[in-house]
Each structure stands twice: as structure tokens, then as C-alpha cells.
Amino acid sequence: MRSSAFKIAAIYTVTSLLWIALSDKILAWTGSAMDVPLVLFISSVKCFAFVLVTGFILYRLILYCNRRLEESESQYRSYFEANPSPMWIYNRRTLNFTAANNAAIATYGYTLDEFKNMTILDIRPKADVGKVYSTIKNLTNGYNDSGIWTHLKKDGTPIQVRVTSHVITSGKEDHIMAMATPVTES
């Protein structure tokens, strides 16, 4: 996003400088043959045209950048939602689920709304609560492999999963993106 903002500012600056330099040269070149009120009128028109042209250019650049941002967001959202492994995002402080992908919904049996009204402790045996808090406290920025855990489906069926996660820092609070890969017995 920063590079887009820089590009917009750079294009605006270059366009502005070219407009000012070239339009003043043309006006000075032709102005000697015109009377002062006409030169002043043309100068005013030139200023209005500058504002309209650069306003339109800025509008188009912002639309273009917003469209690219929306496409990128949609692409990354689809990576999360369509991932074949159960994934979710939760608030690090409250432990509330903020999102769950389709694989998590299918594997655990909860709807997305049910997930969003739960915490990560709700899918764990009560005996693991202390270990969950300890593990979350020790998560680092980057890849975290928390090992194999027992999770509980909606119907109470236990499943063994390998939990990996990544801290997502956005705004005031950290969120954790976690993936629970079912462990198959061999």
C-alpha cells in the first residue's frame, strides 16, 4: 500500500510540475501578443484545468489501487477459506474465534456463527486449559509449531491434531491464525 501511495504522489508531483512549467512557458510565449486581461483570464482557466485534470488523475489512480487491493484481499481470503486443513483466527487476549474456514466448519461440526461465539478453550478438554494459556503466552512472531493436541468436535468426539500458528499483529490487538492438521494413526 505504501508503494501505491508513493506512486500516486510521484505521478501527481510530476504531472503538476510539467503542467506548471509547460503551461507558463506557452502562456509567456503567446502572452506578448495578448493584452493583460486576456492573459489573466487564460491563467485562471489554466489553473482550473490543472485542478480538474489532476483531480481526475488522482481519482483514477485511487480507483486502480483500491481495485488491486480488493483483488489481493480476495485472493488471500480464498487461500484461508478454501484451505483443506481446518484453520481459524482468534483474538490473543480474549481467545474468541474471529474467523474459521470451511474445513474447520466441516471437521468440527460448528457453524461459522457458532465458532464466532466461542473461544478456543471450547474445543479443548478442560484438562488442557492451563497448557493452552502457557502455549499462547509463548507464541512468537513467525511460525509456531505447538505440537499435537486433543480437540473436541461439536458432538464431543475427540480428535488428534497438530497445531501450527502465526501471530497476526493488526491495530491494537494481536490475533493468531492457527491450523489444526488432523493426525492420522499409522
Image (cartoon, rainbow, N blue to C red):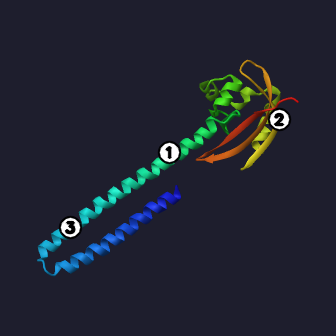
Q: Position of residue 30 (x, y in %)?
A: 18, 78
Judge whether 154 appears above or below 8 on screen.
above
According to the picture, the residue beneath numbered tag 3 turns out to be 44
Under tag 2, what secondary structure?
Answer: strand
| Spatial separation of the CA atoms under disc 3 and disc 2 | 72 Å
- Mark 1, Cα crowd under 10 Å, few <14 / some 14-19 / many 20+, is few
Q: Position of residue 2 (x, y in %)?
A: 52, 58
User: In the visual, does 104 lie left or right of 124?
Assistant: left
According to the picture, the residue beneath numbered tag 2 turns out to be 148
> Residue 32 falls in which quadrant of the image?
bottom left
User: In the visual, does 59 lie left or right of 25?
Assistant: right
Under tag 3, what secondary structure?
Answer: helix
Q: Earlier in the sequence, mark 1 or mark 3?
A: 3
According to the picture, the residue beneath numbered tag 1 turns out to be 70
Q: Position of residue 72 (x, y in %)?
A: 54, 46
Badge 2 amino acid? Ile
Residue toward you, 127 or 163? 163
